[in-house]
Amino acid sequence: MATSTAAQRHSLRRFVALLAVLSLLFTACGSDFGAESATDVAADATSDSGSASGGDDAMEDDAMEEAMEDSEVFTSDADADIEAENGVGGPVSNGDQSVSQRTPADLGREIIFTATVSIGVDDVAASGAEATRIIQELDGFVFGQQTRGGAQPSTVLIFKVRPSDFAAALERLGGIGELRNQSITTDDVTERVVDLESRIQTTELGVERLRAAMEGTTNLEDFARLEEQLLRRESDLEVLKGTLRTLRDQIDLATITLTLEQDRVTNGIELAFSIYEGHDAGAACPGTGGNGFEPGDDITLCLEAINVGDQTLTNLNATDTVLEIDSIDDLTVVFGDPDELQPGQSVMLAYELTAERDVNMRLNLTAIPTDGTSAEAAGPAVRTQSSPSVRVDEDAADPGFGDGFGAAVSLLSALWTAATVAAGFAIPLLVLLPVLWLVWKGLSRARSARTDRIEAKRQANQPPPPVHAGAPTETNAEESE
C-alpha cells in the first residue's frame, strides 16, 4: 500500500511539472493564456491528485505550492512582455520623431502617490478653509484634521484626491501661503498587487477544494483535520484580501498631508534723532549739524519714527516731559502719515526751540498695530523711548551788565555765606574765653615762680668772690673806723 501511494505521488509530481512546461511553451508562443488559467489548471491537477490519494494533506500542500510557483513565474513573464511592449523606461526615439513618455497609469502600473506640504500663512483658520475648498473643487475630500491653538496656531489636514488631480492639487495648495517644505513620494506596488491577486486566487481554489473534500468524507478524524485546514486557509484568505483592499485604496486615491503654520508676527518702532541750526519748519530734516550751540541760537530737532515690524501701525503719538510735548500735535509733520505707518516706512517730525541751556530729553513714541484691513488693534501697543541731548555752550556768550551784576551778587552771596559760617563758629567759643584766660594766667604764674626758684637756687650754689691783697675788706674797714 505504501509503495502504491509513493508511486501515485511521483506520478503527480511528474504531471504537474509537465503542466508547468506546457504553460511556459504557451507563453513563449504569444498565447493570451492568463495567470488565472494557469492557476485553474494547477488547481485542477491538484484536485485530481487529491481524489486519487484520498485527500492526503501532504500531497495537497505540495501540489498547491508548485501551482503557485508556476502561476507566479507565468505572471512575471507576462508583466515583462507588457513592459517591453509599452516601452517602459523613457521616451522611444523613432528617427526624427520621439514618442512622449507616458504616465505610470498609462503603462498599467499600480502607483501610490503621497505628498507632505508645509505652508506658512497669516490666518490658519481662513487658509484651512481655502485649502478645503481647493480640494473639493477637484472632487477630493478631507480625510483627517488636527488643529492646535495658542500663540502659534497650526493645523494638519489630510486630503484624498484622484491621482490624475495630484499635481494640480499641490500647485493650488502651494499658492495659499509661503511654501516652506514639500516632499513627494511614489511607490510602485504593481508586483505586490499581482502577487496578492495570484495568492488570493490560489487560496480561494484551495478553500473550495477543502470544502468539497469535507462534503465527500465520512471519516470523523478526516473531517476534523480538513475543517482545521479550511479555517486556516480562510483566515489567510481574509488577510490577503484586506491587504489588497488597503493597497487599492492607496492606489485609487492619492494622499496629501498639509500643515498650515501661523507666521510669527513681530511689531516694533524705532526712533532716529538729528538736529541742525535754524528754523524752517523741518524742511532740512534729517539734520546734519553738530550738537554744540550758543545761547540764543534757533535750532530744530528732527524725530524720525520707523516701523520695523510686520504690521501696519496707527495712532502714532510722541511725548516729552522735558520739552513739555504732550502729543504729536505739538510737532510738525515733515513727511509720512502718522495715522497709517506701513511696515518699513517712516514719519519725519520736527520741533523748533531756542537754545538756552543743555537739554536731556525724554522722548516716548507709541503706536497701535493693525492688520491693515480694519482700524481694530491686532496686538498690544508698541513703544520706544530715547534720551537725546542738546548741548549749549553758555560760556560762549559775550559778557554784559547782567553778567557783571550777577557776578557781584554771587560774590556778595559768597562773602555773606563765609561771614555767617565764621560767626557761627566763633559764638560758641566766647563762652570758653574766661576759662581759657584763667587757665592762661595760672600757667603764667606757675612758669614765673618756677623761674624764680631756679634763679635763687643758681645764686645759692655760686662760690663767694675772691679777695685781693691790696684791697681792704669790708670788715677791716669797719674796724679802722
Image: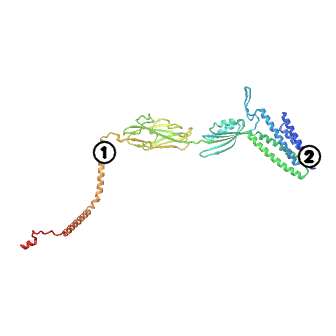
Residue 140 place in picture, x, y as percent = 70, 38
Q: Quadrant of residue 153?
A: top right
Q: Residue furthest front?
A: 469
State the residue at coordinates (74%, 26%): 95
**Left or right: 16 with respect to 392?**
right
Asked if the residue under mark 1 is in contact with the one under mark 2, i.e. CB atoms within 8 Å, the reply is no
Q: Nearer the viewer, mark 2 or mark 1?
A: 2
Residue beneath disc 1: 407
Please state which of residues 414 and 452 is positioned toward the viewer in this rendering: 452
Secondary element under disc 1, as helix, strand or loop, is helix
Q: Is residue 354 visible?
A: no
Count of all numbered marks drawn on residues in the image: 2
Give the amino acid type for the residue marked by disc 2 in the picture: Ala
Residue beneath disc 2: 7
Please state which of residues 300 and 246 is positioned toward the viewer in this rendering: 246
| Disc 1 residue crowd, few under 14, some 14–19, many 20+, Cα 10 Å | few
Q: Is residue 270 visible?
A: yes
Residue 32 place in picture, x, y as percent = 84, 34
Q: Residue furthest top?
A: 96
Please state which of residues 457 and 160 is positioned toward the viewer in this rendering: 457
**Left or right: 122 with respect to 212?**
left
Sooner in the amino-acid sequence: mark 2 or mark 1: 2
Please determine whether, in this image, residue 83 is positioned above or below residue 383: above
Q: Quadrant of the C terminus?
A: bottom left
